[in-house]
Amino acid sequence: MKKHAMDARQAYLDRVEPHSITLLHAGEAPHKSLDQYYHFSVNRNFFYLTGLDAPKLILMLVKGEKKHQTYLFLERNTDFIIKWEGARLEKEEAHQQSGIELKDMRYLDEFEALFNQMMNYARSPFGTVPKTLYLDLYHVNANTKPKALSTFQTVVAHYPELTQKNANEALAYLRMFKSPEELDRLKEAIAITQAGLDQVLSTLRSRDNEHQIEAEFNYGITLAGAQGNAFDTIAASGANATVLHYHHNNQPLPKDGLLLLDLGASKENYAADISRTYPISGVFTDRQKAIYEAVLDVNKRTIERVKPGVTWAELNAFAKEALAQHAVALKLIDKEEDILEVYYHSIGHFLGLDVHDVGLYHLPLQAGMVLTIEPGLYVSKEGIGIRIEDDVLVTETGVENLSRNLIKDVADIEKALQ
């Protein structure tokens, strides 16, 4: 990811104001209980610009009028850290992975002094001091403050002359367009997800609980080299599949029901996001097959419509109308206007370092974007929930289905389950 990170930093600096400093933190594992911590997951914007997956690091990007500078701050290794937790990232290794010059590597305890130098008219290497501070100001919700404000509270408090701006404005745009290195990781994540689904297909008929299905998927992707799950697996059988974000995965499998799987492997922080629906008995009933074929038809036809210039609104409208027509024909609803009773989400989202990746949904699709296409029908009164989701790449001339090798036709599914 070295070339990608170097190109991404340059592209980012091209989009932000001159006389600015950008600060991004890699994050650290939050406390769980007593002496236990949750698994570390790197801040995705930090990773996008560095390719480094390690805690506590700080990236500083300084943009002058003509001169740019990149600094990386690392944690010092100590005998205690090395013996108890393993050695932290060293400068040479960080240089090899990120492309940041060795001379621009510092330790965390040097951060405040260097920042103060940047803000000192007499000592600043840029001849003037920055006027704008870019931070990752993502809000989880309206009642929480951005994490960056506490991480960099000393800077925010001590330099009120800096105008704060949100680095996400530039990063959300840039992250929509996947580099060749990013596409390689996404394809690997999808291939690993396929291995997990193959494991599920080979064992489904001998299993009797949702948690066993989740275990089979985890087994398959772990053997195939996954970094882990891109998100919490949904293994929803019967009526559970009508709950979009069902997560309990602990109910008995109804032998004559369907199993909806929404899952994905992670590879070097890039996420796959796939949904498939299988008959637990190995064979669809006539009613299940009819509803399944309706969803599959909309899945395939919507994918065919993906191309540069098409908007999300157009894709959503097409899928909603097509599903409504099927739903009326199947007598799931009385009229097309009632489609929200059986289909209550959008047709998809951007995909990348996050499952629901950052991006600007008002923009028409452009080459290099990766998105999901995931129509569904959810019939509570019949205990049927069906979703079929693929990961697709917008190309210069149309679309490439990156998950095309993951079977979804009725005949192929039934054959795999025999």
Image (tube, rainbow, N blue to C red):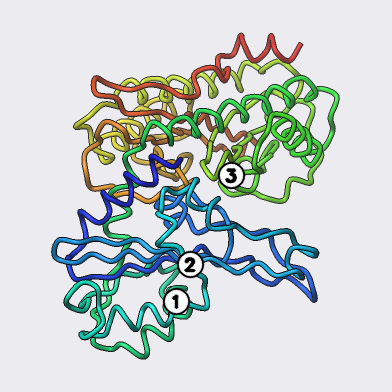
Gap between marks 2 and 3 measured at Cα? 28 Å
Amino acid residing under circle 1:
Phe
Estimate how packed mark 1 is, as few (under 14), some (14 to 19) or many (20 or more) residues with alpha carbons within 10 Å: some
In the structure shown, which secondary structural element does the residue marked by tag 1 occupy? helix
Residue shown at the point (67%, 26%) measured from the top left: 197
- Does residue 186 lie above or below 162 as drawn? above
Pick the residue in front: 36 or 370: 36
* Dots 2, 3 in contact, CB < 8 A: no
| Upstream in sequence: badge 2 or badge 3 | 2
Horizontal side of residue 379 vs 63, given as left or right: right
Residue extending furthest toward the front:
103
Which percent across, then down, holds residue 48?
42, 50
- The residue under label 3 is which amino acid type? Ala
Q: Are marks 1 and 2 in contact (CB under 8 Å)?
A: yes
Quadrant of the image containing the C terminus = top right
SS for dot 2: strand
**Among all residues in the image, which is located at the extreme left?**
65
Amino acid type at mark 2: Phe
Give the alpha-carbon distance from disc 1 to disc 2, as whole Å.
7 Å
Mark drawn on residue 73: 2
Task: Please tell me the numbered disc located at residue 111.
Answer: 1
Q: Which mark is residue 230?
A: 3
Image quadrant assignment for residue 236: top right
Nearer the observer, 197 or 234: 197
- Vertical placement of 299 versus 266: above or below? above
Dot placed on the residue nearer the N-terminal end, 1 or 3? 1
How many numbered discs? 3
